[in-house]
Image: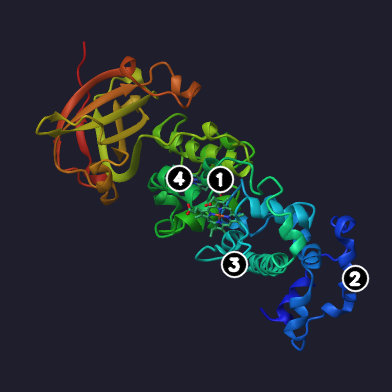
Amino acid sequence: MSAGLLLAAASCGPTDAPNLAASTEGERLKHEQPANADEPSGEQPPALAEEESSLRIFEKRILPIFQAAKPSSCAECHLSGVDLKDYIRPTQRETFASLVAAGLIDTKKPDDSKLLTFIDRRPEKPSLVTEKVRRQESDAFRAWIRAAVRDPELLAEREKAAPAGPELPAEVIRHARRDRVLASFIENVWSEVGRCAACHSPDRNQKQVEKHGEQVSWIKLRDPEGTLSYMLEAGLIDTEEPDQSLLLLKPTMQIEHGGGQKMVIGDHAYKQFRRFIDDYAAVVRGKYVKADQLPESSDEISLVTEIWLKIEGVPSQYDKMLLQADLYRRTDSGWSEYRVATSDRPVFGAKNLWQHSLSLTAPRESKWADELPAGRLPSGRYLVKLYIDRTGKLQRDFTAELGDEDFVGQVEVESRWPAGYGRMTVVKFPIVD
Ligand code: HEC
Ligand code: HEC
């Protein structure tokens, strides 16, 4: 690095930071340059920068990072759990010793220090602002580590401290990583937003936009990451009170929704949305401290389709109750062990009718799971098992599941499962006595 760069970067930090380290190592400050010497100047001979004491670099460039209120560049990928501040102690001596103890400084090959690898890790599309912060952090630590490993007094004290680093267990840090959070968003929310696409996806909702404005286009086409960022910016997800998120209140009609009721509390999509939103809120608010607090991932993955199932002749006594249809596929050895599709929605009693689009479902990491993205249900014979929430238990506890006590009957159907609202597969509600 050139001296010009080094000096320019040094002038970015607050220069009036409390001098925490000075009491023990103050005598080295005699090398300090006058304040105006750090004006950017490409003319400085590199030797001058080399000579700067590690203490001076620490105080001018590392301590300000420690004291800064804003998060470090790590936040671009770690939503919580780690920050560069976790690796800095109030004094240079402690910081060096604890970083060596943690194996993060390589005293023989300072440029290979693991801490620098952490800092230099960058996303494919880094934000310009964060990139600038990262550059400052990287330059500051590189300069300091290079100088510090040449200091015999610091070297003598190495490893005489508890290892530096975040206090949280690795599982928690991993869970709060942006790529993990995005994967959870795709699995739980993106997989279901097809239900909302007719009115909320910019390729399909011109009329809605004309009437209601651009904000109805909250789905960003083929861009789950952009969709999540937009939802956060637009305040559709409430991290203080997750269950009050607009993303839930609107489609469940807990508040007025231009699209009507598209979801009910406790149904499949609602559960999926809550799984993501509740977890996201806990991550960004730093609620997880132990690995056993992390939510278990579900055994099943799902994907909404445009394949519709219609049930006729539903007794009107079930009006407005949630009906869940689980589909099992005929195989050589009988019905599939697990459901291959599901769908749930309240019964329309006045018309003795129930109809809804199917979500394909598969046990995680099964062979069928690999085929889910195609969004097709193979033609053939299926068993449709029906459950109705007659006691309203899902309303009371959205995490409840319908089970044997909610079973109301089953029916077999042969279909090619064409997609489209106009091409529904129709079955008759089974007569049960
Ligand atoms: C570009 C995204 C990105 C940035 C920025 C980033 N990390 Fe990471 N971090 C990761 C990934 C990915 C992993 C998992 C790496 C692996 O498992 O090999 C990880 C893992 C970690 C771990 C777990 C332990 C380990 O040895 O892998 C720690 C601690 C950590 N990062 C700290 C930091 C710190 C501190 C910063 C900021 C100085 C930072 N990270 C910046 C993506 C990032
Ligand atoms: C039939 C059309 C239609 C469908 C389907 C639909 N919506 Fe809407 N939605 C609207 C309209 C129209 C508005 C604008 C008026 C309003 O805010 O209620 C809206 C507004 C919203 C808003 C507020 C956006 C903002 O920034 O103000 C959210 C959140 C929302 N819908 C969520 C959903 C979800 C989630 C689904 C799918 C489960 C869904 N909607 C399905 C028509 C629909």
Residue 184: which disc?
Answer: 4
Q: Which residue, given by chain and number where applicable, does mark 2 sit on?
A: 30
Point out the tag, 4 or 1, that comes first from the N-terminus. 1
Give the residue at x 61% y 59%.
115
Point out the tag, 4 or 2, that comes first from the N-terminus. 2
Answer whether residue 263 is visible to the viewer in this image.
no
**Horizontal and vertical percent position of residue 119:** 60, 61
Point out the tag, 2 or 1, that comes first from the N-terminus. 2
**Horizontal and vertical percent position of residue 160:** 71, 49
Point out the tag, 3 or 1, that comes first from the N-terminus. 3
Circle 3: element type: loop
Residue 109: which disc?
Answer: 3
Residue, far top: 433
Circle 2: element type: helix
Amino acid at pointer 4:
Ser
- Residue 138 lies left or right of residue 230; in this view the side is right
User: How far, Cα to Cα, is label 3 from label 4?
Assistant: 39 Å
Q: Quadrant of residue 313?
A: top left
Circle 1: element type: helix
Amino acid at pointer 3:
Lys
Residue 349: which disc?
Answer: none
The image shows residue 213, relative to residue 360, as above or below, that is: below
**Horizontal and vertical percent position of residue 80:** 61, 47
Disc 1 under 8 Å from ligand 1? The reply is yes
Q: Closer to the camera: disc 4 or disc 2? A: 2
298 and 393: which is toward the camera: 298
User: How far, Cα to Cα, is label 3 from label 1?
Assistant: 28 Å
Give the residue at x 23% y 47%.
376
Give the residue at x 64% y 48%.
165
